[in-house]
Image (cartoon, helix red, strand yellow):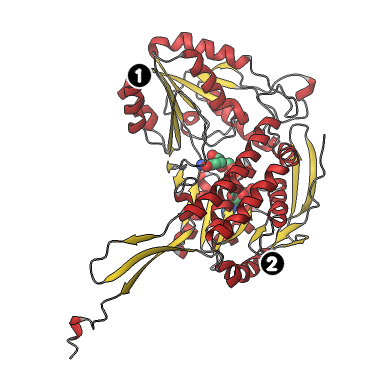
Amino acid sequence: MSFPFPDGRLFVGGEWQAGSGAEITSTFAAEGTENMRFAGASKADVLSAIDRAKTAQADPAWQRLKPHERAMYLYRIADGITANIERISWLQSRDTSKTRNEARALAGSAAATFRYFGAVLETSDELLTAPRGDYLTYSVHDPIGLVGAITPWNSPIASDAQKAAPALAAGNAVLLKPASWSPIISLELARIVEEAGLPKGLYSVLPGSGREVGNLLVEHPDIGKVSFTGGTSTGRHLAHVAAEKLMPISLELGGKSPTIVFEDCDEDLAIAGILFGIFSSSGQSCIAGSRLFVQRSIYDRFVSRLVKATEALKVGHPFDAETQVSSMVHADHRASVEAYVQTARDEGGEFLTGGRRPEGAEYDNGAYYQPTIIAGLTNQAQTCREEIFGPVLVVMPFDDEDDVISMSNDNDYGLACGIWSRDHAKCWRLARAIRAGTVWINTYKQFSISTPFGGDGASGMGREKGRAGLRAYQRQKSIYEDHSGQPHPWARWP
Ligand code: NAP
């Protein structure tokens, strides 16, 4: 089964129009072919989208909607995604080379995100606070206005939904810039948003270069908040721009997450979880468990079992139902992973498996890379400090709890952590001691839209998801209402 690609027009302030910016090419890296080319957004397109968004967001008809009325748009978008899940996930697989199963799961999670934030909106209460005088005090939440959303290529539809759903629920207009390597699915989502009847102008999708379109969204004085997911160096740059404007920005950035295996773990569970944690999505996952610490007493046996299990993974075409590890998103990205593998070699890493492209005619044109496990490096090696964003795992032994806490935390990133042990009290101690936005105990890479997500340190700031996710796109306002009817005593009114 195949589906038509979008027609290459952009969704600018509620209108479908040809872009007037630089050309964008979407590729199917698994086969080394092109999906489509089209003109991306220019500065003029972005400015026009911003103008239309301002008008649409300020429209009293949108402003006055009650929460349960605004929530209906989110439910309709969720229904639209669900009704089109095969088409959306097919396009997502073509755009990113993700397996069909993963693409379906991401589309399902996007629908759930819109549904969840519709429900959060309907059920969020404003706060009556304790007065300290003869007045009523309450605290209410208003929309920020215009929100810029900038997303990466690794899970596009889920990242788009994670920003668009709470931002629209909060009453804002959203201007979304998808990554240049994965523009298709964001344009598809725009079609669903349009079909859901969202008033024109409240949603725009502006594929285009990060430096031009992305930067303009962050710099523009009318944009009141930016929600960014992407690399740490880009995030750091955008944080500077936001600081200059005194604009709130949330940053979901990279990771180099530790996974810790104690001698008392269930080894079968741990091996399955570790494989999923690092090699699913071909390792192109911010929360990939890319540093593995194994207790020295079981190190040799455990690592040799892990290597064997890794070699049994099926590397293959994203449309093959048996495939576990698919092509990387783009040949250029595989080149960057290969450069890191070379660094690991130069640092004296011992390759237990992988470290090369898979061999065979079926892989020749695609951007495949063999799941790779490297030993013999210290936690200080560049390979252990920097995010590779590919199917590359480094294994290191540890002796005791203190040892592994200190090695886990000795890294700039603080996104996620996995702990494998049957001792609950020990897991609890570790979970509290390790600097990470998310800790998984005896599981890995599980997500719930109702559970806050984000990173610390070089992994970013702010949290998405959860009930508070809505508030991240609102301004809080406190109101004092005097009921005494008396002049203020300070004035000594006669
Ligand atoms: P990236 O290069 O930082 O790009 C992310 C987005 O920012 C893209 O849309 C990109 O546009 C845009 N961009 C680039 N330079 C910009 C600039 N100067 N101003 C404004 N926007 C700019 O990251 P990526 O390679 O796409 O994504 C991989 C990274 O995302 C990894 O580090 C991964 O860990 C991180 N990530 C984090 C999370 C999380 O939740 N913590 C989730 C997923 C991914 P172009 O595509 O046009 O360059």
> In the displayed structure, would residue 9 be above or below residue 441?
below
Q: Considering the image in quadrants, where does the N terminus appear?
A: top right
Q: Which amino acid lies under the numbered mark 2 shown in the image of this protein?
A: Ala
As drawn, 122 above or below 153: below
Query: Could you tell me which secondary element the residue under label 2 belongs to?
Result: helix
Q: Amino acid at mark 1?
A: Asp
Instruction: Report the front residue among 269 and 450.
Output: 450
Residue 294 circle label:
none
Q: What quarter of the picture does the C terminus occupy?
A: bottom left
- Helix, strand or loop at disc 1? loop
Quadrant location of residue 486?
Answer: bottom left
Outermost residue to the top: 301
Q: Position of residue 77 (x, y in %)?
A: 65, 51
**Is residue 237 something that shows in the picture?**
no
* Circle 2 residue: 44
Q: Residue at x 29, y 75 (%)?
A: 483
How crowded is the residue under tag 2: few (<14 C-alpha within 10 Å), some, or many (20+)?
few
Q: Residue at x 51, y 37 (%)?
A: 448
The answer to which quarter of the image holds residue 431 is top left
Judge the density around disc 1: few (<14), some (14-19), many (≥20) Cα neighbours within 10 Å: few
Please give the name of the residue rendered at 53% of the width and 65% of the height, measured from the top-left corner.
Answer: 145
Judge left or right: residue 367 versus residue 72: right
> For mark 1, what is the residue?
423
Mark 1–mark 2 distance (CA, rounded to whole Å): 59 Å
Q: Nearer the viewer, residue 278 or 403?
A: 278
Spot occupied by residue 442 in the image (x, y as percentages of width and height): 45, 23
Of marks 1 and 2, which one's residue comes earlier in the chain?
Answer: 2
Q: Nearer the viewer, residue 133 or 362?
A: 133
